Image (spheres, rainbow, N blue to C red):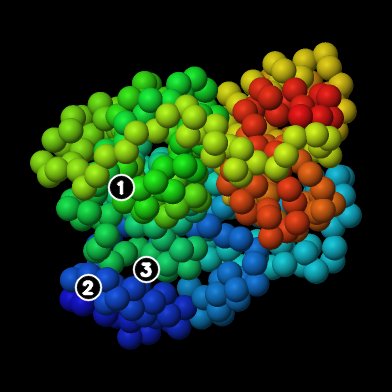
Amino acid sequence: MLLTDEEQKMLNGFYGEGTKLAMKILVAVGEAYDAPKMVPVTRTHVALSNQEADLWFAEKLVAGGATCRIRPTVNPSFHLKQFQKITRIEAEDEAIVKRTHAAYNRLEAIMTYDCTPYLEKNVPRFGEVIAFSESSATPFVNSVCGARSNRESAQSALCSAITGVTPLYGYLLDENRAGEILVHVEADMTDDFSYQMLGYFVPKKTGFSIPVFEGLKNPSKEALMNLGAQLNTGGNVAMYHILGFTPEARDMKSAFQGKKPKGEVTITEADLKAMQQEISDAGGEIDFALFGCPHFTIDQIARVVDLLKGKKLKVPLFIMSSALSRNLSEKMGYMDIIREAGGELVEDTCMDQPCWKFLYGKKGITDSPKCAYYTKRRDMRFVIASLEDSVEAALKGMY
Ligand code: F3S
């Protein structure tokens, strides 16, 4: 790869061992993808996870004196103080949260602990070259914002944050952003939940190609967030287009960059219903409800609040959101309504964290296939249903 003098200085260790390691990793990634050079990034987001390997890497960079040139926002961990009121946190889990927090603070990350940075705090503009990890984030920034990010790992995004550059390959190049498969959507798409199912189902039909959706009408930001999160969970799809709606798909010509689609598929209401049945646990009694994977927006919280007003939940209901949305919920009286019903709204938290140990072995309900997918390995089972049906089930203790 052709490196600038500054990049070569980083690689030679002029800025210390941490920066040297970060640049060495990016050069290796670049060589693996035949990238000719590095390009500067203007934003980064790191899918921090509290897991041992992630912490090992962050601490190694800290020990090597690294700090971030392009300070990243970070993914959720779990909010110790809020969870200590809900459950007993084991000493080893508390220790790893504190060490991760300390390491990323030393690296000078922006400690947002939120998996929807593209909606608040780290919103890219069209054409910006960025390095984002987090499976719900990369499809959103590429497809909805028209920014350019590869499907980064937590580690490669952190290396870009430290060095300020990323190898030029993949989704950074015009030719790799063209749509590949035309997807005719004949399903009703009446609510944001339909987009969860569409996103989860499409890669089963089209593989990991870039889909171009035809037939979607003015999806909400939550619908777009759901669509991307599930495309990148049900499959490995970090970019999509919606004809006449997303910025690189004004029409067929621009969406496919003048080429013919490699294939066409049609998605019906029956397809989405069948997908829901296949991945959802059977109905019956439930033990809890869990929402916010990805983090709920203030509008989604408001919908839950409307459904809970003046009622009492049969089973606990948890919502995960950003610190900003939780703060707004306090100010707007939403927290009181949620708590009076018997629910809880927590910030900074991901469902794939050990703070949920008290729910292992139990059966919940959620509107997110991603939530159900990641928690299988933690022995949590989920009925997957629309937000309205899920809240209704939590009020009755039964779906
Ligand atoms: Fe967010 Fe964790 Fe789900 S990062 S999208 S709550 S898996």
Q: Which residue is mark 2?
A: 34
- Tell me the residue at 36%/29% (across/down): 185
Q: Is residue 265 above or below residue 61?
A: above
> Which label sits on residue 280?
none
- Image side of residue 96 versus residue 2, left or right: right
Of 212 and 32, nearer the camera is 212
Could you tell me if the residues under marks 3 and 2 are in contact, i.e. CB atoms within 8 Å?
A: no
Q: Which residue is mark 1?
A: 210
Q: CA distance from mark 3 to mark 1?
A: 29 Å
Residue 275 at x, y percent in the picture: 54, 39
Crowd tier of the residue under label 1, counting other residues whose Cα lies within 10 Å: few below 14, some 14–19, many 20 or above: many
Where is the C terminus found, in terms of image quarters?
A: top right
Q: Which residue is mark 3?
A: 163
Q: CA distance from mark 2 to mark 1?
A: 21 Å
Residue 63 at x, y percent in the picture: 56, 80
Residue 95 location, quadrant: bottom right
Q: Look at the image and tell me whether residue 65 can be seen.
A: no
Mark whose residue sits in front, 2 or 1: 1
Answer with mark 2 or mark 1, whichever residue precedes in sequence: 2
Residue 205 at x, y percent in the picture: 39, 46
- Tell me the residue at 35%/63% (across/down): 164
Give the residue type at disc 3: Thr
Mark whose residue sits in front, 3 or 1: 1
